Image (spheres, rainbow, N blue to C red):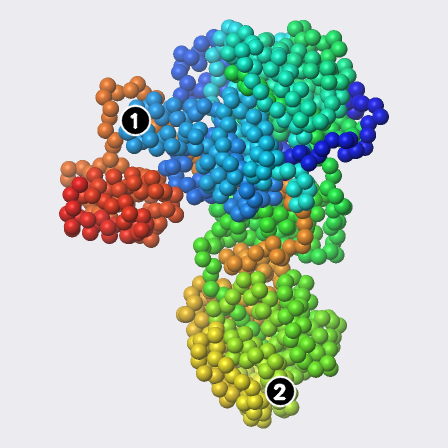
Amino acid sequence: MTTPHPAEDQEPYGSEDRDRSLDVAVTGMAGRFPGAPDIATWWRALLRGEVLTTRLDREALLAAGENPAVVDSPDYVPVRGLLADADRFDHELFGISPREAALMDPQQRLMLETAWRALEDAGCDPTREERVTGVYASASSSAYLRAMLTSHTLDAAGVEEALRANEPDYMATRIAYRLGLTGPALTVLTACSSSLVAVHLAVQALLNGECEQAVVVAAAVDFPQLGHVHLPGGILSAAGACRPFDAEADGTLAGSGVAAVVLRRHEDAVDAGCSPHGVLIGSAVNNDGRAKAGYQAPSATGQEAVIRAALTAAGVGADTLGYLEAHATGTRVGDPIEWSAASSVLRELGAAPGRIAVGAVKANIGHLDAASGLVSLIKTLLVVRDGKVPPVTGFRSLNPLLETAGSPLSVRPDGFDWDGDGAPRRAGVSSFGIGGTNAHVVVEQAPAPAGPAPEDAPDGPEHLLVVSAATPDALRASAARLADWLPDHPAVPLADTARTLAAGRAPLPYRTAVAGRTRAELAGRLRAAGAARAVGRTAPPVVLLLPGQGSQYPGMAVPFADALPGFTTALDDCLTRLSEGPAARVRAALFDPGFPAAELERTELAQLALFCVEYAAATALSGLGVTPVALAGHSLGEFTAATLSGVLDLADALALVTARGRAMGACPPGAMASLAVGEDRARELAAAHGLELAAVNTPESCVLAGPAAAVEALAAALDDPERARVLRTSHAFHTSLLDPAVPLIEEAAAGVRLGRPTVPYVANATGALLPAGTAVTARSFAEQARGTVRFADGLAAVARAHPGAVCVEAGPGQALSGMAVAAGLTAVPLGGRQGTLEALGALWAAGLPLDPAVLTRPGRPAHLPGYPFAGPRLLAPAATVRTAPPTAPAPTPDPAPEADAAPARTPGDLVAARWTELLGRPGLTPDADFFDLGGDSLLVVRLAQRLGEDLGVRVPVRSLLTGPTLAEHTALAASLLLAGDPR
């Protein structure tokens, strides 16, 4: 069903002769409302016409602090638009201490979270936004601050802290500071119209070049959230229902909520590939002046003027509008004045009778005071975006005081579909404040994105989805929400989803990453993602593992070429240094899964192919920022390590590997077997079967080698616990069968220039970690081919030198990763079963400085589920006190008073107690940092004062600043006591 009076002969979208360079796109939005934790839930409820206000029971009201006499009054109306969990705050995410967070007005806390989520919805990383972004913030008067100030429990310093944490002056600037936003940061307060006035100011700032992006955020959360006492003639409803424009309307209701939008110039948003929720094409603000009955009364003249000015700014006629979200408080005086003013000006500007459907969101959620205009804007954006007009909830019959003759306005008790008949859907939004500041915004449906979106296919490319959060619970919730979202939004390409997660989300400490080709596959892996450890502020050290012969297989370069940026370029660099025949043979073996496996097992080809893959993978990782502190190559892998460390240049390395492979290939054939036994048992078995110990890979894993018949006999003789696994090799490497190759390898090595390593690497023959700068001889390369590979000793040396290192196996397979785990190290195999792309994601999840955006395909910013805020409940003690004020100011209680018999506290006890008092954090450790825990320079001054009172000495603020840990503050306190510098 279309709007009742569609315009005739409408022109195609965008064909009008109007200046679109002044249009502003809404690229992101977020909100929490009565009865709805997010916009999607709220929108579904509005379309169903639900009343989302709550009738509070007596027990809940009394528990919240309402006076029993008030609750029991016949004029008390126990109804409001209740915001659930308004006292929760994810303070850790913003680096705010629990104590500072508890002091903050819940409105300002919620505004921080909602601004964050709106930026995410706009495809922006809230912590690394490079665009000059302004903040325009509005909120209702702080009842939270009033509760603290009237508790009479705060000393002078406490009052100052409470003011700084709650007063509106700090509202916008705190958001700008916490999110690192550098544009104008303005608090906008014009009573009920505050947030829509803020939208207008943000639009002007964008058009004037004052910022490139703007966040408009508003909140209205009373403290506590209670009902109201109806006063005859007042604006609050006696019936407990807001029924705008209805014959039975008797006033409005208070509601609580928070909302935010992100704005950009439309042209910039389109260039960035954004999919706006809608476009603001005109706005205006004015004031009634004295043209009204009283200061709090509305003025039809002012309202007409602001609507006219907004349409003029938009450059469109009222005949192009199909919807008006009215201020609509449901009051006996306000509604008729608003109806009359809007009808008059819209009729004058060309709107046909009954053409414009009227909306009134206050009927659903109550009046959100300073946030109401922004909430109305978000609803209107949804109307023009989706082409669905919700019903005016509770409407039964039109208020007889409304002038309906010839009015362009109509109230629909039922919702309807609005297709726009090919023209862009347009609507107006009004918001009027007590005191006469009026605002009106004209909204237009956003044009479809240029160019078709790519389609997903089961056989399409892999996509990497990265998710992070500030806590393990939030990470699990984020992954689960994304998993639920994926199958329900098939129109959003996976490339857009992956790109937005990688480039438009904050990289937080707890992380996970999954890869897949389909939504179902990705959703399943997200749900199965295990618990993650928090990454540190500094990246863990990286050790590259470089496998030897036996790990090769046909087509082993394909996973790296598909997923690892820079791999193909580095591989081509290797292959172009080979002669044409070997290069073609190696390339075929690397990229053709059908290449004969038996041919690739030939030593000369296998070693050259493995070297090229390992070198290319390691070089590509370095290009991504993954720089190793050490290298551990197994057998052939030691040659790759020597090359990466600077001992060999690439051309010489290729020549030496070729010569090594040729020399080894000419030796008598043999076989190798891996056994799950320790070195002593391996030597016993070797002696019993005529074999030699070729490698000690872990304390419980060794390799024996020798004639093929002897290896087969060993495998047949062993019981299951000592089962032998025969390796894919053509020779018994690292045994006496390789003796003929030793002089040939030494001769080849003597013919190249050997540098000194710049990165330490493991010497297989000794198991030692060669320090940077060590002299390397040609003989060592020859002995390495003959002697036992002592890889377990090498990994142990790595673990001692670099505890906490992440080992990355830069080659096919994952055998070396298992060895590293056995040595107590974390390992990620690039060529393992999980796949190269997911392995790269695992490196990011482990905290390595790898930008996941380079691992994604081009994509547009997508509107994805936002951060699942679920912080603790925080309430300042002073805000809970409701007793009568004492006759004299009570002294501030010591946080840990000592009994007469208690022993004197040490400087450490005193410092820790004051930290806990000022930061709200118990369980402190000596290395805890005052500023990392949410402290700031003003709190340091307070700390110096408190410690000075405790110790009876002067505590220098500078010393507290320069040595910010608990241990340093404790040492300072002890030294000051010894010096005895009195206050």
Viewport quadrant of the C terminus: top left
State the residue in front, 261 or 533: 261
> Which residue lies most toward the right here?
9
Indicate the position of residue 499 as horizontal and vertical percent values.
64, 50
Indicate the position of residue 920 as horizontal and vertical percent values.
35, 39
In this rendering, the answer to whether 752 lies above or below 698 is below
Task: Please identify the quarter of the rendering in which residue 427 is found.
Answer: top right
Residue type beneath disc 1: Thr
Q: Sequence-wise, which precedes: disc 2 or disc 1?
A: 1
Residue assigned mark 2: 659
Indicate the position of residue 449 as horizontal and vertical percent values.
73, 42
Residue at image point 15% right, 47% down: 980
Residue type beneath disc 2: Ala
In this rendering, the answer to whether 703 lies above or below 490 is below
Residue 304 in sight here: yes
| Secondary structure of residue under mark 1 | loop
Residue 699 in sight here: no
- Neighbours of disc 1 within 10 Å: few (<14), some (14-19), many (20+): many
In this rendering, the answer to whether 431 lies above or below 870 is above
Q: Using the image, tell me which numbered label, if any, was put on residue 47.
A: none
Q: Using the image, tell me which numbered label, if any, was put on residue 153.
A: 1
Task: Please identify the quarter of the rendering in which residue 132 is found.
Answer: top right
Is 790 placed left or right of 908 in the picture? Answer: right
Residue at image point 44% right, 63% down: 804
| Secondary structure of residue under mark 2 | helix
Indicate the position of residue 543 as horizontal and vertical percent values.
50, 68
Viewport quadrant of the N terminus: top right
Residue at image point 59% right, 35% down: 208
